Structures are given as C-alpha cells and as structure tokens.
Amino acid sequence: MRLFDTENLNQIAHTFSRGRWDNIDSYLSNSWNTLWRGTLDTLYMVGFSALFAIIIGTALGIILYITKSGGICEFRAVNRLLSFVVNVGRSIPFVIIIIAVFPLAGLIVGTSIGKTAAIVPLTIAAIPFVARIVEAALAELGHGIIEAAISAGANPVQIIFRVLLPESASGLASGYTITIINLITFSSMAGVIGAGGLGDVALREGYQRFRTDMLIGTIVILVILVQGIQLLGQFISRKLDKK
C-alpha cells in the first residue's frame, strides 16, 4: 500500500484551491460593494450640498457685489452685515460646524446622523465660500460694462442676469469647481464622525480593521473624483470664456 495516494492528494489540492479562490472572490466582491456604496454616498452628499450652496451662495455674492460702495444698488449697512456673516462662516473650522449643526439637521431633514443629515453642515460650510467666489468673479468685470448697460437703459435685474452673470460665467465655473472639490474633502471629514461615504469606509473598514486595501481604495477613488471634476470644470470654464 502506498503511503501517499497521488489521486487523493490531487483531489485534496483541488478542493483547497477552489475554496481558497471562492473566499478571495467573496472578499473582493464585498470590498468592491463597500467602496461602491461609499462612493455613491459621497456623490449624494456632495451633489446636493453643492447645489444648495451654489444657489444660496451665488445670491449672497450678488447682493454683496451690488450693495457695496459704488454698486448698482448701494446699501452699505446690508453689505457690512452680510460681509460680517460671511467672514464669520468662513472662519469656523468645518469640524466645529459639523458638531454645531448636526442637531439642526435633525430639525431640517428629520435625522441628525447619516448622509442626508451631513448635507446641512456641508451646505452651510460652503455657502460663505461660494459667496466670496461670486463677489470676486463679478468684481473682475470692471465698471465699464455696467456703465454701458446702464446707458442702454437696463435696470438692476437686467444688469445682473443679462450682463454680470453671463460675462462672469467662466470665472464662476472655475469657482464652483473649487467649491465641489472642497466639498469632497469636507464629506470625507464628515464620514469620519458617522455621516457615511468614503470617509466612513476609510475609518471603519480601513483603519479600524487594519485593511490597507480599503484605505488605498478610498484614496484612489477620491483622487479620481477630484481629477475628473477638475478636468470637467476646466473644460466648461474654457467653453464659457468669451475672451
């Protein structure tokens, strides 16, 4: 009787190999699903917070520009008040905004945790940034184009929507791109304290479970997102540039 049966050894090796590869496939599948869900959660938070921040921040930026000294609707008291509020909002670190605003998120969206709740602090943090970007983009136009519009009989509303915004569209696109990229960074920070997204994946799956592959995966996805948004923003800005 042979001590080692070649046929039995081959069968055992085949069974072991098959089980091992099944485990690897399951491992990779679970890792991919976790990263995919984290990516979708990040896009959800960034997308809605960017939309709300751009709408509100653009309105504030326009008001700051037209109410300043020499503006088409000069109102120094309003300008100083809004400027103070915007400066205060920009000076508060995002981590503090998250802690302070999460209870407010419960009143607005019905929950103080998770990806939907994170939209509130993300939006509040981005609004002052957008306001200053819009104000700066409008200030680059100069007074000549505004004076020409006034001479043509345009009222303030027409000047804003037919002159200021169209002429500054390229600069605004660049500013909005920077805002969205910053929101991606902020969303990762929010994920660390339970908001979900790639930040949560990096902390919970990568750091706490010592899974280097998940940490690398989140970094790669974040780099791809930022680079993709940057390239898209540059393309749109060039298309809108009238110079």
Image: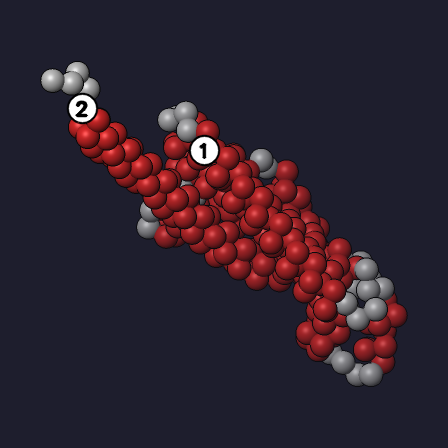
At 54% from the left and 41% from the top, the residue drawn is 220
Which quadrant of the structure image shows residue 204?
Answer: top left
Q: Amino acid at mark 2?
A: Asp
Q: Position of residue 222 (x, y in %)?
A: 54, 44
Task: Identify which residue, 115 or 33, lies in the foreground.
Answer: 33
Disc number lying in front (2 or 1)? 2
Task: Provide the secondary structure element on which disc 2 rests.
Answer: loop
Q: Is residue 200 left or right of residue 85?
A: left
Looking at the image, is mark 2 or mark 1 earlier in the sequence?
2
Residue at mark 2: 5
Task: Provide the secondary structure element on which disc 1 rests.
Answer: helix
At 42% from the left and 51% from the top, the residue drawn is 40
Q: Is residue 114 left or right of residue 188?
A: left
> Disc 2 and disc 1: Cα gap in Å?
40 Å
Residue that lies at the very extreme toward the left in this rendered image: 1
At 19% from the left and 19% from the top, the residue drawn is 4
**What is the quadrant of the C terminus in the image?**
bottom right
Question: For mark 2, does the 10 Å Cα neighbourhood hold few (<14), some (14 to 19), or many (20 or more) residues?
Answer: few
Residue that lies at the very extreme toward the right in this rendered image: 144
Which quadrant of the structure image shows residue 172?
Answer: bottom right
Residue at mark 1: 213
Q: Position of residue 233 (x, y in %)?
A: 66, 59
Task: Identify which residue, 123 or 196, lies in the foreground.
Answer: 196
Q: Is residue 121 visible?
A: yes
